[in-house]
Amino acid sequence: MKNKILNTVLISILLLVVVFFVSTNFIINVQWFKEVGYLNVFFTKLIAICKLFVPIFILYFCVIAIYLFTLRKSIRSLVGDTKFKSVKKYFLLSNLVISILGAGATATTQWYKILQFTNAVPFGEVDPIFNKDISFYVFKLPLVQSLFSTAISLIIILVLITVIIYLALGFKDKIYQNKDNVININSKTYGIRKFAGKQLAVLASVLSLLIGCSYLLKSYNLVYSTRGVSYGAGYTDVKITMIFYKVIAVACVISSIVVFISILKLKFRPIIISIASIAVLIVLEPVVAIFTQQFVVKPNEMELEKPYISYSIDATKKAFNIDEIEVKEMEPNENITSEKLEDNKDIIENLKVNSTGPLLSFYQQVQLIKNYYEFNDADTDRYNINGKYTQVFVSPREINREAMTTWQNKHLRYTHGYGLAMSRVNSVTEFGQPDFVMKDIPTVNTTDINLENPRIYFGESDNDYVIVNTEGGEFDYPTGDTENTFNYNGTGGLKMTPFNRVLFSIYEKNPKILMSSSITSESRIILNRNIVKRVQEIAPFLTYDSDPYIVVHDGRLVWMMDAYTSTDKYPFSEPHEGVNYIRNSVKVVVDAFNGNVDFYVTDENDPIINCYLKIYKGLFKPLSEMPEDLKDHFRYPQDLFELQSKVLTKYHVDDPIKLFTEEDLWDRSLEVVKHGGENLSQGDEGKEESILNKAKENKNNEAENEGLYLMTKLPDEENVEMMLLDYFNMRGKQSMVALLGARMDGDNYGELVMYKFPPQRTIYSPILFKNRIQQDPNISKEISLWAGKGSEVIYGDIIIVPIEDSLLYLNTIYLKANSENSMPEMKRVILSNGDKIVIEENIEKALLKLFNYNSSEENKNSNKDETPKTETTSDKSGVKEAADLFNKAIDAQKNGDWATYGEFINKLGDILNKMSQE
């Protein structure tokens, strides 16, 4: 007795341990979702699956049970009552297993489609062929098609059950004991037809009906056809394929009747004829369609396909939200006068002279402070700095996890990044270096932007866990040879209770979590620290922009992310990047210190986000609840903008004839990324590309120009604003034909503006302007001189901005010594009006030389030296001494010797003051 009790206890303990190990992930998920405040979102899926499982299980079980019930007479008459009772148990068990597996598979794969179906929101637009609201295709049709596939699978399962029972019980050519008599069962008198003929007849009939219905449903898929010259149903699809599908559906209905009667009468010829007829129709459909396409449509393609091309144009424009672009005609002239520049002084003041690649390289050399920090990216934003609307680069200083070698340093000690580097987009120092407004550790802030808590626990770096508020504290920031520590006092993370220490030791497969003496009951473990993975855990049904950016808000740092709703089920809309409908419906805000995540709905007219609002109650907040100053930092997302730009290369036209003839196809303007011995910096990606080949200029040397965030002013507008610009040229040519701008300030957010240029004129595109720079003798001479001295030449971004009815071109040149820790510095500005081109030390000199324009303000775009002057010997010696002091200050800064750094900076200030007085 004692042994039985002991065995029971041991088995119970073992089962509990197994259950605990298996449920570890579930328990952690429940705790984590509770921490972030979205436990209801986590249970939405589980509750939906459970709610669906029960009725689906009952349906499966009842259908199979009823079917088996219809076989009972056949089974009982052949195995006898005694054996029948034992067989019934196996039938019941088999039914339970099949029903559980079938219901589980259906519920776990179809729960999302069912929720979309039951919470569908109309689009208010119908397709031109079937006159169905778009919501039918996006929310309803996928479920209906899946259910038909499931029904067909269930029929096949029932057929298999019949055959298995028939074979397993040995009804064919076997002898059974039936009570007191021995019965010899002959397959000719008691074969499968006599055993389950009626049942199989019903199943075959139902299967034929389902196949017929599936062809009717298949007709709706023609709105995604790729057969014609445009996406969606074309002439052949509508006039041939759709008719064949209807005929096949009718044939299947007739066949279901024929099959049912023929199986009962044991006449197989009608079955063969009906099945063969359907097979012939199925084979004949593509043959007739191809014949029609080649010999009817092709000779008259423009006339026959014209209405269907119009459907595709309208649908694609609406689906990608490019149907309401404000299009303006512009014929640029090269007459940029000093008066015109003075009238547009705010554009000149905000010209972008910094590029992300060289700037990020400089940040990494000067602002890392220690090797355990890293800058992952530099993003563009705008702030009111000391009362002036200013565009800036912002880059958060995060912990470099790869620099950590021990578990304690990686998970307990170095837990967070610190602060950020912020510099002006439109200016550099006199040495051609970024003009910082925030820098260093602790943060040196020369702005009126309040930053009280610069610590970054959640960012773009890896997703590994950290444990905070431990004994001994966390590393905060260095001061000379000492280290300041910090104890986390935020709300993020899960408390390390004894239970959680055991739980996470198992989950992370690391006993150190359980054994470490540094971890106390007040410690917290922070999970999902990568902001993208964090929001994906909460809302995986959204698509997220690839470029989150950090914002200083209310004294702390927060991340802003753009999220998209999308589908590939929009009728007649041509897919790009795997989707054919997309909206930037959500802005996500993640607190860098606490990890709080808020989802704000920005497009209340989007049916998909409104469907999600009904499914995931409590997940989304209205935009009215977002702090107003955060709205000032909205950016038009670059991923969406570039996707829309790609779509516009084909779908900028309204005339179906033009689309058919392809006479007005565009390309996004190219940028030279490899050219004769120099490095080029392109776009907002922070990448520099090595230039290897000297004489080659082909497709291997070119890439699409990336959209740029610029602070500029559109013609006819009064104020500068931050915009995202992209450029287009005619396909096969390099002359620019259009400029696209996305507005994002205030009430103008989301507006797209396009300026079209005369295609018969040669308007310099980015690649043409880059080629002209390369061919200019004065510029190439300077570049060759620098390259000959061992310097690396880096080109900045090409900027093209409209100034009233003219275009201004700008490019910058950086120099970088060919040494491991050298820093790129902006040394030249190239400026052009499309006719003349000049290269000078700064914007002011370039404007003076090209337009005879002398700005009235100082310290705007680059060097503080405003007018050309002859350098004296004392000037040169002063500059040399200043440069020497600056380099020494940088060395001291890298070594964390802030006292020496301050001493050199003070001396540098004295020299600069003296030089300015001279």
Image (cartoon, rainbow, N blue to C red):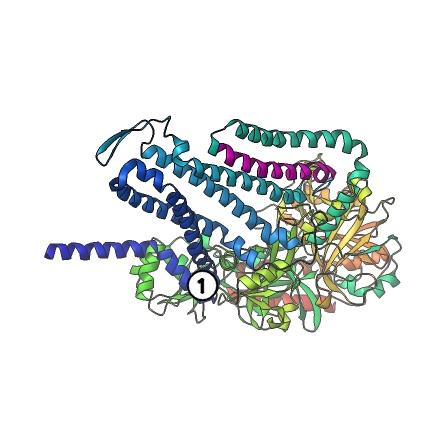
Q: Nearer the viewer, residue 868 or 606?
A: 606
Magenta residue span: 235-263
Q: Quadrant of residue 72?
A: top left
Q: What x and y, as percent, mark residue 901?
A: 55, 64
Label 1 sits on a secondary structure element that is helix
Question: Which amino acid type is marked by label 1?
Answer: Phe
Most frequent secondary structure within the magenta stretch: helix
Category of crowding for the residue at label 1, using alpha-carbon neighbours closer than 10 angstroms: few (below 14), some (14–19), many (at least 20): some
Residue under circle 1?
33
Q: Quadrant of residue 20?
A: bottom left
Q: What x and y, as percent, mark residue 326?
A: 79, 58
Q: Quadrant of residue 328?
A: bottom right
Seen at 75% across and 54% down, the residue is 323
Q: Would you say residue 477 is visible in this rendering?
A: no
Residue 250 among magenta residues: yes
Residue 139 among magenta residues: no
Seen at 29% across and 60% down, the residue is 515
Image position of 402 with respect to 209: above or below: below
Q: What x and y, as percent, mark residue 615?
A: 54, 61
Quarter of the picture holding the N terminus: bottom left
Total marks shown come to 1
Is residue 256 left or right of 322 when viewed as pictured? left
